[in-house]
Amino acid sequence: MNKADGPRFDLAEVHSAAAEGRVVSGGTRYKDKLLPLVGTLSNMHAFACAVLQELRPEDFIDFQVYPGGTVMDAYGIAISGALQQRFGIEGFMTWYVKFTVEVDDEGKQVLMASLHGAEHPLKRVGGTIPVAFSRRNT
């Protein structure tokens, strides 16, 4: 499995689910690294939804199949300045995002997502992006 195989989940559907808040996010790195940046659990959820809405096809890295058969798409994104400003995290640009899609009791897609600041350059379909952090203006 590699990038040439493409993502497993349709990005338009991912954007729609994220816009409607149908996202469950978690993971140890996610909580440990994001909560200090955005301050509250509700901000963490809103941030995850906003980042998922900014994903583009060229941000795709690869997909992974976990034990038990869960498939997750992985993306690397340099989030917009507007998004950084909205959440008060100016300078934290490069993020690693992975998610899978499940269907809830009402038949709607729900994203099970995790994201954290990139720890190394991310090799994406659209080219490698460096880990990019800059200082805030104080």
Image (cartoon, grey):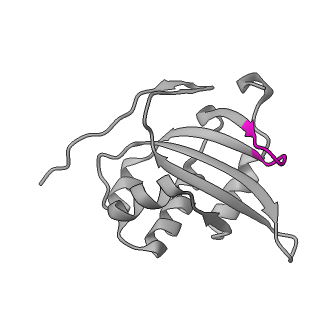
Residue 116 versus residue 121 in the image, above or below: below
Name which residue lies at 47% across and 66% down.
44
Provide residue 37's location: percent of width, then percent of height. Answer: 34, 60
Residue 20 versus residue 112 in the image, above or below: below
Q: Nearer the viewer, residue 97 or 79?
A: 97
Q: Nearer the viewer, residue 65 or 106?
A: 65
Name which residue lies at 45% across and 27% down.
121
Name which residue lies at 68% across and 59% down.
112
Which quarter of the image is occupied by the C terminus? bottom left
Q: Residue furthest left?
A: 138
Q: Quadrant of residue 78?
A: top left
Provide residue 19's location: percent of width, then percent of height. Answer: 63, 65
Most common SS among magenta residues: loop
Residue 83 colored in magenta in the image: no
Q: Nearer the viewer, residue 33 or 105?
A: 33
Which quarter of the image is occupied by the N terminus? top right
How many discs appear? Answer: 0
**In the displayed structure image, the side of residue 66 where residue 85 appears, left or right:** left
Residue 42 versus residue 98 in the image, above or below: below
Q: Residue furthest front?
A: 67
**In the displayed structure image, the side of residue 82 where residue 68 appears, left or right:** right
Q: Quadrant of residue 104?
A: bottom right
Q: Quadrant of residue 125?
A: top right
**In the displayed structure image, the side of residue 2 where residue 121 appears, left or right:** left
**In the displayed structure image, the side of residue 91 where residue 62 appears, left or right:** right
Residue 93 versus residue 15 in the image, above or below: above
Provide residue 87's location: percent of width, then percent of height. Answer: 37, 63
- Magenta segment range? 64-71
Provide residue 25's location: percent of width, then percent of height. Answer: 59, 62
